[in-house]
Amino acid sequence: MSHQNLPPSRLRADAARALFAILEQGRSARDVLPNLQKPYADKDKAWIQEMVYGALRQVPLLQHWLRQLLDKPLKQKAKVVEHLILIGLYQLAFSRVSTHAAVSETVNATKHLQAPGLKGLVNAVLRTFIRTEMASQLPQDAHILAGLPKWLYKTLDTAYPEQLDAILAAMTQRAPVWLRVNRQRCSLDNLCKAFDKHKVDYQTSAQHPDALILSRSGDVTQLPGFEDGWFSVQDGAAQLAAQYLAPAPGERILDCCAAPGGKTGHILERQPQLAACIALDVDGARIARIEENLSRLGHQATMVCADATQSTWWDGVLFDRILLDAPCSATGVIRRHPDIRWLRKASDIEQLVTLQAKILDTLWPMLKPGGTLLYATCSLLPQENSQQILSFLSRTADAEWQPLSDGEAAQQPGRQILPAEQQMDGFYYARLLKSPTIDNKTR
Ligand SMILES: C[S@@+](CC[C@H](N)C(=O)[O-])C[C@H]1O[C@@H](n2cnc3c(N)ncnc32)[C@H](O)[C@@H]1O
């Protein structure tokens, strides 16, 4: 497809539309950005993403400035112009775009938003921002400076008073691209050789036997071996799931909440001799993505589209191991998905905790005596992690937790990985063992 050379003002208008869709309509950046970017060349797509992601990281500060610059909020039908101003302020305060281009192209963008009548207002607001040197006037509020909603800032501050600064810094950093070699198609050594030959820079990781970390981001589908399924993109923290689950030959495995199949693929790569691998998810469209991903990698699993809070789909045959990659707040992956800061609401957390508990309780009877359930989330919130597991242990007589690696002197169940720890995303894992007593009813 040929790419048009679109005017810079159009890029700003589309960035404003995307920001509006995320902040006002609660749509995810993943849904919104590809639609807006269709006719664009790669560099323009990257520019729009950088502006939108950058603004998402600074929403409270940009809105704080906006409130001082506008006498009153714009009417609902012109709301997108407020988001255009936020994009303009972001360019002026945080980007390397020249002041002249930031002002004139943002002002010109009003015509693409069918708001030419607001051209003068946008111009006046941006010029006042420059003239009054507002960018150097920072408020005292910690959550505004951290670029987080107040509830999330408070929760993190309470949970991690010592590590808060490091967590906040990690949330604004660019996340590295991690790859996972497909052991069934290629060794890590051979993948390194292929990358060396094509001058692709990378590092390996002592804790991750299947991983490479790329030194630069780019289109991974263009890397040697992608079409042949030699590797997948998967963060280092997510790569620990198959390692901790440690499936053995002949076992029956349930990968619950499996879509798009990142961890299913890794389980099958590490243990191709399974008796069965069942990948379950409630979302049919996302199950199709598991199929696509596994087919590129050359793996097979049994797909089940079902709600994991119900056991109606289950044939009654017990599992040796279950991975539950639970639906969660995704607060551990905010550095990759800055829209999560605004899409997730304080009221979601209680609902998520209830859902996770319900899934745990539904899956537990499906596990063999002596079997293992690995609980995982990409959350930083103790309610979804250690507190969830402690509460499960307190109501489940035949469950106990087991440290995740030898010699780990854990005081409480699970491993909480904080974002950027060994370059990984924020994640939580807890390994639960079912007591080996034989239960005649479910044998
Ligand atoms: C964290 S994502 C899973 C990522 C996946 N394990 C991987 O490694 O690629 C959580 C998944 O839970 C699924 N989910 C949410 N609620 C569910 C439910 N009640 N039953 C089954 N799956 C559910 C979502 O559709 C989503 O695909």
Image (cartoon, grey):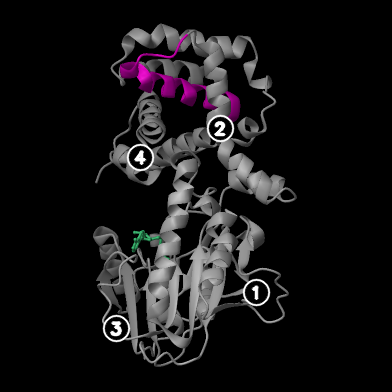
**Label 3 CB sits under 8 Å from any ligand 1 atom:** no
Q: Nearer the viewer, residue 428 or 120?
A: 428
Which secondary structure lies at badge 1? Answer: loop
Comparing labels 1 and 3, the label whose residue is closer to the camera: 3
- The type of residue carrying mark 3 is Gly
Tell me: residue 92, above or below residue 240: above
User: Does 256 lie within the magenta span?
Assistant: no
Circle 1 residue: 206
Say the numbered circle drawn on residue 97.
none
Circle 2 residue: 58
Q: Is residue 185 visible?
A: no
Q: CA distance from mark 1 to mark 3?
A: 40 Å
Where, by quadrant of the figure, is residue 13 drawn? top left
Residue at image point 58% right, 14% down: 129
Q: Earlier in the sequence, mark 3 or mark 2?
A: 2
Say the numbered circle drawn on residue 27.
4
Comparing labels 2 and 4, the label whose residue is closer to the camera: 4
Which secondary structure lies at badge 4? Answer: loop
- The type of residue carrying mark 4 is Arg
Q: Is residue 149 visible?
A: yes
User: Does 84 lie within the magenta span?
Assistant: yes
- The type of residue carrying mark 1 is Ala
Pointer 4 local density, CA inside 10 Å: few below 14, some 14–19, many at least 20: some
Circle 3 residue: 316
Q: CA distance from mark 3 to mark 2?
A: 50 Å
